[in-house]
Amino acid sequence: MTTHTVQVTEMIAGGVTTPKGFKAAGVSAGIKKKAGALDLALLVSDRPATASAVFTTNRAQAAPVLVSREHLAASGGQIRAIIANAGCANACTGAEGLQVAKQMASLAANAVGCPADQVLVASTGVIGVALNIGKIERALPAAMAALGTDQGANAAHAIMTTDPFPKETAVRVTIDGHDVFVGGMAKGSGMIEPMMATMLGFVTTDAAVPKAMLDRALSEVVNDTFNAITVDGECSTNDCVMLLANGASAVTITDASYAAFTDALRTVCLKLALGIVRGGEGATKLITVTVTGAATTADARTAAKAIANSPLVKTAIHGGDPNWGRLIAVAGRAGVAFELERARVTIGPIVLFSDGTPFDDAAPEAAAYLKNDDILVAVDLGAGRDTSTVWTCDLTAEYVRINAEYRT
Amino acid sequence: MTTHTVQVTEMIAGGVTTPKGFKAAGVSAGIKKKAGALDLALLVSDRPATASAVFTTNRAQAAPVLVSREHLAASGGQIRAIIANAGCANACTGAEGLQVAKQMASLAANAVGCPADQVLVASTGVIGVALNIGKIERALPAAMAALGTDQGANAAHAIMTTDPFPKETAVRVTIDGHDVFVGGMAKGSGMIEPMMATMLGFVTTDAAVPKAMLDRALSEVVNDTFNAITVDGECSTNDCVMLLANGASAVTITDASYAAFTDALRTVCLKLALGIVRGGEGATKLITVTVTGAATTADARTAAKAIANSPLVKTAIHGGDPNWGRLIAVAGRAGVAFELERARVTIGPIVLFSDGTPFDDAAPEAAAYLKNDDILVAVDLGAGRDTSTVWTCDLTAEYVRINAEYRT
């Protein structure tokens, strides 16, 4: 089982500008409808940073995703800046949209003073609507002027769409006797309001990390954090997590310090990811779903995701109903090895079904437990020794209201 | 593409007792909480009928499913009766539950006068609660006394849980100059109220159909009907569709009449299946999802099911929002071949996205179309020539209310 216990020196207030050598800005470019709303974020490293990123697996990839992939390859993974906007996803916008995403990178590169392919681009918001590059061009000087080591919070605000709160965090970890910082910001709340989309994560560190090691660390950590959450099972056209390591701490991560660095990275990513779930559309509860007794790790993840995406499970927990039969039924239909006679269902500390026998007398105790805001449900598939943990939120009438509102 | 156009002589009022040689009854056994509610259904053929059935693929199979599978094999597919109850699913009830399901079959067999393995059993209702066999034993004489060719409607009522209306239908088809009837009843409304479950379908015909041909016909038809609907993506522990062909019409189906028989069977099953969707939990709209341009039939079905189960699509349609971006996003994440530059999205007759270009000006027209109760959405994946159609309903706050209600 992957453990989420982390040895870090300190979790601290902060975000993407907590690591040394990073500045950020969040300004209003007039892309969001609300006048003056922050909607353009800029993140700049004072030197080329080794970069790693994971992108949506959706086959309908938005223009900024295509451009960022290309720049990451063309630059050899050496990145100076990220420019991101909210209010328009620049997705399903054809050749014109691709041109706009490239222009965004070029404009930022000119302002920062680096090659265009050292800039990554991200967008979130309405799908299928053209992004007005003029608005970004006109707002860039203000963003450059605002850049600061104390502007991370504004950047975190500028990438929000209908997120109920910004998500940023930082940690300090001591490696070889030196402080290394990892910081991050994220947005996402499901696919949010009609035609709005996307989960974005931006993480910085002042450690120096060899490119291959950085890729490996991000891949491992994202699998346990951003990829282990679900609000509504949807995966957008624009999802991405970008990680910049600029080496400003003068500490280079080696095989010996890889675990400590990865733990720090996991702490940051998990906090951001859980923030997305807590701020999920209409959410009132954070639900941790742990599957044990799986034949394979893939089975464990598949079953955990099936439970976390089950509308029947999510509504039952919303209603405070310790409905273990639904957990059994979802585990049984998840397409994984499952042995009813050896299965077990636990809600919080209360066993409700074990080895073929229901313990329905415990239902009132489980119902009382479900009044909490943070809920743990666990299912043992009775088919092996592998495990997985994912996080989700409850499904509420407010989710329906948010997503059924008229766009037209 | 499977066509759902059917040549039948006549769709007629009726149900499982419309075909010759079948009697049914629906009585109150006191299993449902509400006093006097019909909750025990009996369906009897006056001679052994060739039987075919499909069962839930859930690995947590309820006791009646296990017993029915066993009896179908042991009897060589020759069945005299089906006994079904609502109010208790007899699922996750261990060895004792298995014994109770066997007793149900034996009691019905004794009453009807046939071997126990010529009886099939079905249950629907609360999971994990013991089924009181005494209640069934005491109600059986009343069910036997009530058996009649005009009692199909009572049987259709007796298998309901929280279905808003009973579902029964019949057709007459002329084969070799003789009338053949196919009739059916079904229940299901999602996984319905807390701890309630299951879709059940019972279909009768007075045609004589060789066992292998009957199995093939049911398998084909179920794939296009009961397996092509979804309310909430859940598959219960008790789902089953049972088909009895007793030959009382003296017409034997041959290769020459197979298509006509299968069309009649499809008409009955489709009407029952669409009844389940229309009566889905909280549903206000019936949504037909057609996927075209798929690389394979499996891809087409996978994409259509992903769209039909997408909470974002279902809430958008509920809200009358012609949100084509969500359809693209779901098609893109469905894990099937998808070419954005050749894809197309149609809502009703209105094209909203085609070959990489959005037609957002058509959104108001599409919004007006979405005020209808019956909605067609179509996505062309731009990746091939295969197609699939599935049916679902909208996702409403009422669905959440129904499923979040306290069970305890």
Image (cartoon, coloured by chain):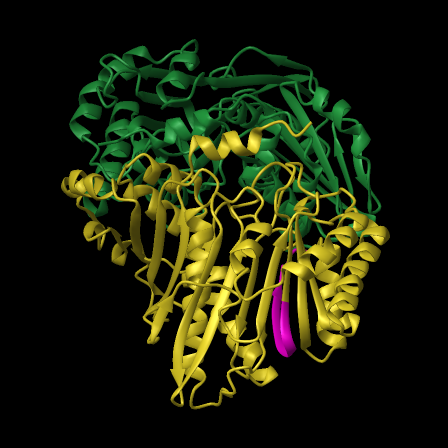
Chain colours: A yellow, B green
At which x and y percent is residue B382?
80, 49
In the rendered view, would you say B102 is above or below B361? below
Range shown magenta: A44-58
Please tell me whether the stretch drawn in magenta is mainly helix, strand or loop: strand
Residue B403 horizontal side relative to residue B256, left or right: left
At which x and y percent is residue B189?
45, 27
Picture residue at 16% right of the left edge, 27% below the top: B134
In the rendered view, would you say A129 is above or below B156? below
In the rendered view, would you say A257 is above or below B81? below
Residue A107 position by quadrant: bottom right
Between B287 and B355, the one lying in front of the other is B355
Between A327 and B8, the one lying in front of the other is A327
Direction left: furthest residue: A361
Q: Quadrant of the C terminus of chain A?
A: top right
Kindly tell me whether residue A394 is visible in this rendering: yes
Between B213 and B313, the one lying in front of the other is B313
At which x and y percent is residue B388?
69, 41
Query: Is residue A26 within the magenta segment?
Result: no
Residue B81 horizontal side relative to residue A55, left or right: left
Picture residue at 26% right of the left edge, 23% below the top: B111
Residue A286 horizontal side relative to residue A366, left or right: right
Between B343 and A125, the one lying in front of the other is A125
Picture residue at 68% right of the left edge, 78% below the top: A78
Count the marks: 0
Direction front: furthest residue: A145
In the rendered view, would you say A50 is above or below B206? below
Q: Quadrant of the N terminus of chain A?
A: bottom left
At which x and y percent is residue B107?
23, 29
Residue A370 position by quadrant: top left
Kindly tell me whether residue A240 is visible in this rendering: no
